[in-house]
Amino acid sequence: MPRRAPSLRPPAPELDRASLDPPSRRVLEGLTAGLRAKLGEDLVGLWLYGSSARGEARHPESDVDLLLITRRGDADWPRAYHVLYEVSDREGVSPVRFSLKLVDPGWVAERRAIESFFIREVDRDKLVLAGEP
């Protein structure tokens, strides 16, 4: 069965519902484009979740929660973080503001099968920036 290419739709409409300052929004747009380019078919999904996805008021100590699903999971850590650091540096935003959790599709399926509180919350609130929901 051939692999499906990641969604090529731009993240802007989804990000319009998020509570993000303009620099963080630009980082997410650049991160999404960069991950598509760097990971190609290995990119399964990139989801914004948590308070930013729910549109809650931002606090100075708030981070931006992201779940990155790739075919190789943790093995893609170096490539993903390279993109995050490059884009955040370009925008003048600290990369530590972004909490990027890397998993594989099996992890997501397993968490859903056991009805994990974490994945239920993510599924409820997520904004899909790339890939499939």
Image (tube, grey):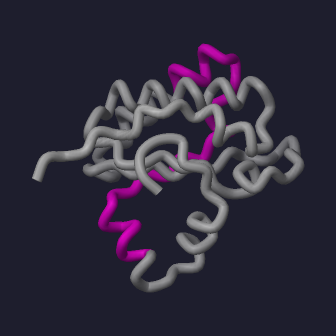
Q: Quadrant of residue 110?
A: bottom left
Outermost residue toward the top in this view: 90
Residue toward you, 96 or 107: 107
Vertical position of residue 111 compared to residue 45: above or below: below
Outermost residue toward the left in this view: 1
- Is residue 100 covered in magenta? yes
Left of 129 or right of it: where is 53?
Answer: right
Residue at 34% over, 42% down: 43
Residue 93's x, y, as percent? 69, 25
Vertical position of residue 112 compared to residue 42: above or below: below
Residue at 57% over, 66% down: 123
Left of 15 or right of it: where is 57?
Answer: right
Residue toward you, 124 or 101: 124
- Is residue 39 covered in magenta? no
Residue at 31% over, 34% down: 39
Q: Quadrant of residue 14?
A: top right
Residue 129's x, y, as percent? 54, 42
Give the residues drawn in magenta, as a range: 85-111
Q: Quadrant of residue 7?
A: top left
